[in-house]
Image: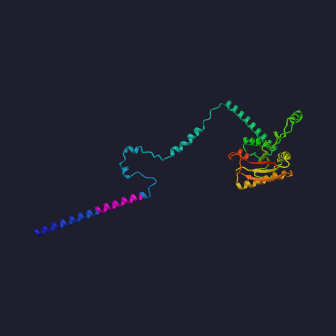
Amino acid sequence: MRETNVKEYSDESTGFGRFLLVLLFRLLLLGVGGVIAALLGVAIATVRPATTPNKPLVAKLLQLPGDMKNPPTTPNNPTSTEQTSPESEAAAVRTAPKLTAQQRQKLQAELNQLQAQLKSLRSSTAALENRVGSSASTEPLETRIQVLTQQLKATPQPQQTGDTAAAAEVDRVPSTTPTSLISPDTLTATLPSDALFQDSDATLRPEARLILDKLVAELQNYPTATIRIAAHTDGAGEAKNNRVLSFRQAQAVEQYLSRLKNRLFVVGYGETRPLAPNDTKINLQRNRRVEIFVESQ
């Protein structure tokens, strides 16, 4: 009887121990699997992080009821600012003062008068450009007037008549006359290329003969001198093309002055010797020039 009880007790102890070992083994597997899963999740999050991270599930479960009523606003939601910014810009633009009908009518009349004066000034400028031979009709009005001012410096002045001409003839000194193209001090003359040639061309304008005829008349006072003709361009375009263009322009002036018995020498400097920086339209026009040097023997 005692042996039977001992055997039953031994079987029960063996079964309980086996159950305990299985339970511990399963818990161990569960722990190892959880650690591996956590490490794998960290590795994936490190390599490829989410572009729009969501709130963790634990934080959502622990969120208080009051927080659900007032969810936090995200700073990267530009919907409200994008909708209100055009309205604010439009409000900033609409800041013109309020005018009465009488004030508006008066201002409109003054504006019409200014427009008529501007149209008349443009017509007068265009007529003057046609007489001088300028080709800057596409430039702003102020620039066109400044170009005309510089071009007219090289054109001969009309001859005086009557007593005024006689008095001027008595006091006139040939070497210091204000209409002389050749400076008596340096024996040089500077002619704007725009008054002699078309844009980026080496063909003389028909109006250029007025300037060159006067130049020929003055150069006849130096029959034994060597005349050096140097042409310059502005800095626009390729340097090689500018050098070729300047040489062709110098040759065109040389051909016109070939009636002289002087020895003529031509050179094209291109853009290498500017008078001013090539940063404005006026400076570009100043750099486009033909210089005449009288080199006495």
Q: Residue 264: percent from the left, percent from the top?
A: 82, 52
Nearer to us in this view, 185 or 71: 185
Nearer to us in this view, 248 or 281: 248
Please name the residue shown 28% across and 63% down the image: 26
Please name the residue shown 69% across and 32% down the image: 107
Total numbered badges shown on the rendered structure: 0
Please name the residue shown 52% across and 43% down the image: 81
Asked whether 28 falls inside the magenta stretch, the response is yes
Please name the residue shown 21% across and 66% down the image: 15
Which secondary structure class fits the magenta region best? helix
Nearer to us in this view, 75 or 223: 223
Q: State the residue lying farthest toward the front.
A: 297
**Left or right of 90 in this view: 196:** right
Query: Residues in magenta?
Result: 27-45
Q: Residue 36: percent from the left, percent from the top?
A: 35, 61
Q: Residue 209: percent from the left, percent from the top?
A: 84, 47
Asked whether 181 falls inside the magenta stretch, the response is no
Considering the image in quadrants, where does the N terminus appear? bottom left
Q: State the residue lying farthest toward the left.
A: 1
Nearer to us in this view, 33 or 182: 182
